[in-house]
Amino acid sequence: DGGITQSPKYLFRKEGQNVTLSCEQNLNHDAMYWYRQDPGQGLRLIYYSQIVNDFQKGDIAEGYSVSREKKESFPLTVTSAQKNPTAFYLCASKPGQMNTEAFFGQGTRLTVV
Amino acid sequence: RKEVEQDPGPFNVPEGATVAFNCTYSNSASQSFFWYRQDCRKEPKLLMSVYSSGNEDGRFTAQLNRASQYISLLIRDSKLSDSATYLCVVTRGGYNKLIFGAGTRLAVHP
């Protein structure tokens, strides 16, 4: 089955530790995205990538880093520089054409204690 | 000002009601438009794309007005299962930037 997979579903980390969230897609999509969602809030764009080895900062990139070494994979690292990392993180992918639907993974709930 | 703005919620309506959501976008370079639905603690899923000519899918009708930079979603004959958050989404730019509104929450009650 084609789809987009995020792992793990739930993640707990101690304050000050870096943590990497996984996002893999087998839909052959060019574009991939990372969003953060806080309770009762909308989705805020962290990073996005249109092609391999290229990515752009979104609206709230500070404290996060990404890589796009393979078309299928777009991991997000939440660094210790991110002041409030506890949130619901969503990864999405879509074809490169403009008028196409984006598909989401099931999300990772990160809790920093 | 946010690039994509939606009606503040929540909308509390009885079953069978008609409800309309509005969304405005500030960047005239926006190129494509969508409505997504998000259930509590789940990922967003596409409800429908929005075209200038308008489009309808069963009880749902979406409209785009490029001149006013305005998108709407109309839900007729509301069902309990329509209770969710509805997200307005625009795409723009050569890098295919995908921008979400904050969402409007709909609660349909018996």
Image (cartoon, coloured by chain):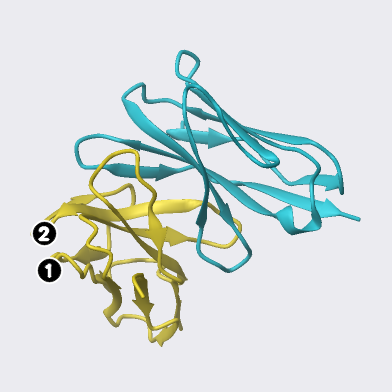
Chain colours: A yellow, B cyan
Q: Secondary structure at mark 1?
A: loop
Q: In this rendering, does residue A61 appear at all?
A: no
Q: In this rendering, does residue A38 appear at all?
A: yes
Note whether A62 is above or below B49 in the view shown: below
Note whether A107 is above or below B16 in the view shown: below
> Left or right of B108: which side holds A27?
left
C-alpha span from label 2 to label 1: 6 Å
**Dot 2 and dot 1 residues touching (CB under 8 Å):** yes
Q: Amino acid at mark 1?
A: Lys
> Left or right of B35: which side holds B110?
right
Q: Nearer the viewer, residue B63 or A82?
A: B63
Note whether A17 is above or below B30 in the view shown: below
Considering the image in quadrants, where does the C terminus of chain B appear? bottom right
Residue occupied by mark 1:
A70
Q: Residue B96 sits in which quadrant?
A: top left
- Which numbered marker is on residue A105? none
Note whether A108 is above or below B66 in the view shown: below
Identify the residue at horizontal 36%, vertical 75% (top origin).
Answer: A1
User: Mark 2 or mark 1, which has the lower sequence index?
Assistant: 2
Please identify the residue farthest to the top as the structure is shown: B67
Residue occupied by mark 2:
A52
How busy is the neighbourhood of tag 2: few (under 14 within 10 Å), some, or many (20 plus)? some
Q: Amino acid at mark 2?
A: Val
Identify the residue at horizontal 41%, vertical 67% (top origin).
Answer: A89
Residue A38 pos. (x, y %): 52, 61
Identify the residue at horizontal 81%, vertical 52% (top origin).
Answer: B108
